[in-house]
Amino acid sequence: MSEGIRIKNKKAYYQYFLEDKYLAGIQLTGTEIKSIRTGKVSLAESYCSFVGTELFVINMHIAEYEMGTVYNHHPKRDRKLLLTKRELKKLAIKVKEKGYTIVPTVLFINEKGLAKLEIALAKGKQYFDKRESIKHKDFQRELDRKHK
């Protein structure tokens, strides 16, 4: 199995305050998992949304598999997330509150070879919050340099 596949959504950490995190499975086709194993995935513009009672990840880009034929997948199709009913109900209640959204943070392949997506309940940052995050990151970088 291909180990070490861990794609992060750095934009989510910058644009949102992440509160609760959940681990979800993804419903994929054969060529999609092959592209994930080669690391050709982008979570940058993706978000999660409810369609009825089901949760879907929208705008996640999984590049077409090079060796695929006419059965290749569409790169930005909506993919169903697999969570328990209790988790879905909890998320649905929170998302109805003003300012909350669900964003994917990390895509990885677990020890069984299954693709998993870590999603987080997030609240958007204001402009001054983003500036504060940048200051904090720069300060941490300076501290790390001094300790080395």
Image: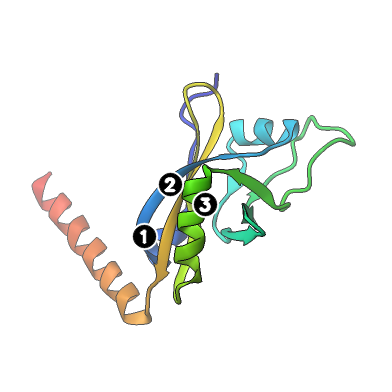
Q: Which mark is residue 51?
A: none
Q: Mark 3 vs mark 2: give the one in front.
A: 3
Which kind of residue does numbered mark 2 sit on?
Answer: Tyr
Residue 18 tag number: 1
Residue 41, percent from left and from top: 60, 45
Q: Earlier in the sequence, mark 3 or mark 2?
A: 2
Quadrant position of residue 15: bottom left
Q: Disc number at residue 22? A: 2
Would residue 38 be visible to someone looking at this image? Answer: no
Q: Are marks 3 and 1 in contact (CB under 8 Å)?
A: no
Question: Which label sits in the foreground, 3 or 1?
Answer: 3
Q: Earlier in the sequence, mark 3 or mark 1?
A: 1
Which residue type carries mark 1?
Leu
Quadrant of the frame with the C terminus:
top left
Residue shown at 45% from the left, 56% from the top: 90
In 3D space, how far apart are the residues under numbered discs 3 and 1 (Cα atoms)?
17 Å
Q: CA distance from mark 1 to mark 2?
A: 11 Å
Give the image location of residue 123, x and y in percent: 40, 69
The amino acid type, in three-letter code, at marker 3 is Leu
Q: Nearer the viewer, residue 130 or 105?
A: 105
Q: Secondary structure at mark 2?
A: strand
In the rendered structure, the answer to whether residue 57 lies left or right of residue 64 reads left
The numbered dot on residue 88 is: 3
Q: Is residue 32 above or below residue 13?
A: above
Which residue is outermost to the left?
147
Image position of 72 (left or right of 80): right
